Image (tube, rainbow, N blue to C red):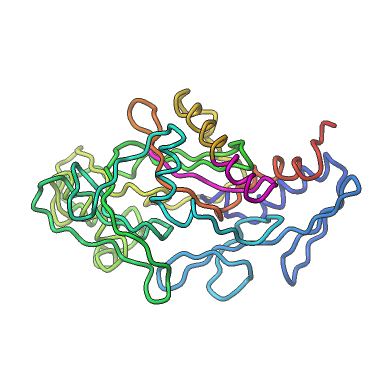
Amino acid sequence: MSYIAITLNHMRSVKAWADAAGADVQMDLRSFALEVKCRNRFYRFHPRFLGQREGRLFHSEMLVEHVTGFIGWLPYTALRTELSSDKLVFKRFATAAGERVPATWPAESPQGDFLLKHSVGSFGDQITGPYRQGATQVRTPPPSLGPGGPTGTPYAEQFIQGRSLKVWYWGDAAFYAHCQAWPTVRGDGVSTLESLAAGRLGVSAEAFALSRDHPLLADSLAFQGLSPAQVLAAGREAWIDFRYGRTYQPEAPSGSSDNQLQDLPAAARASIERMGAAVGGDLMERYHVPVLYAVDGVVDADGQVWWLEMNSNPLMPPDGYDPMFSSLFGSVRQ
């Protein structure tokens, strides 16, 4: 994530394309808008920012209070589609396209190990669990978006273990991916699991116990028959979260791309290509131009992808400027 959210990486990628294409690029520091002229074409690109308010992440198209990072330029403002607004709608779409999705059940009657989710929401906040079917573990309903937020449907989703996957597309073509193993802690025979997790974050166990992530840590440990106050045996490992982006470790700033798309198993890459054809085709019918989107999933032990949800307003990886500009202005090889 540190590579994507570094402003200079975006500037470096835009400059590299502009140098190769002979384009004229101007940025307005007051608005952060980008203007690009090339081959008798002109486009204005809108900035987007990442912020955090009261512990919740948010995206903004303006440099407002609580913004902490820059997440890219696009030739349009925020998009809203049913595929990205409702997770259950996306799952039906992916199933119809022949792709794997976890089973879903009514929240009160799951048929296997499961998470409780809300069909609306983002940033991994409207989730509780995982829970084992039939276990006595206390279940917490998934939180809604709060007063004034969109409404949706609580549901139970089959819990798939594996690696978190996020794939970015421009149009129907994938250009960037992250595939993350779930964060783990290793026992030392002395420290509690809660203190080991807090140590990864660089905070005290007391502070971590009050954080928004602590309930999910407790549920993740309970799924493994453990508890936050338990001392983990020396050498034993336990995973402490399953959501994309939760690494529980500081990330050093980097100017090098961390794109893992080509490192994925062949079966995963084939599924990624099919998903792009399905979603990209649907969006092309709606907008008649290629747009940016990302799709989240889980890669299981067999290298197969189980798709979870779609985001029509994701962060823009710096690697995306070449395919975006090339589709708008023509390939630099022409």
**Which corner quadrant of the image does residue 319 belong to?**
top right
**Which corner quadrant of the image does residue 300 belong to?**
top left
Work out which residue is located at the far left of the displayed protein and give it: 136
Q: Is residue 239 magenta?
A: no
x%, y% of residue 152? 37, 62
x 45%, y 42%: residue: 93
Q: Is residue 199 left or right of residue 37?
A: left
Q: Is residue 89 left or right of residue 144?
A: right
Q: Is residue 147 above or below residue 37?
A: below
Q: Nearer the viewer, residue 316 or 304?
A: 304
Q: Is residue 107 left or right of residue 327?
A: left
User: Which range is magenta?
Assistant: 279-298
Work out which residue is located at the far right of the displayed protein and give it: 40
x%, y% of residue 332? 81, 36
x 43%, y 57%: residue: 123
Q: Is residue 290 magenta?
A: yes
Work out which residue is located at the far top of the displayed protein and give it: 266
Q: Is residue 82 above or below residue 62?
A: above
x 43%, y 37%: residue: 96
x%, y% of residue 26? 82, 59
x%, y% of residue 99? 42, 33
Q: Nearer the viewer, residue 165 or 213?
A: 165
Total numbered labels? 0
x 23%, y 46%: residue: 114
Q: Quadrant of the C terminus?
A: top right
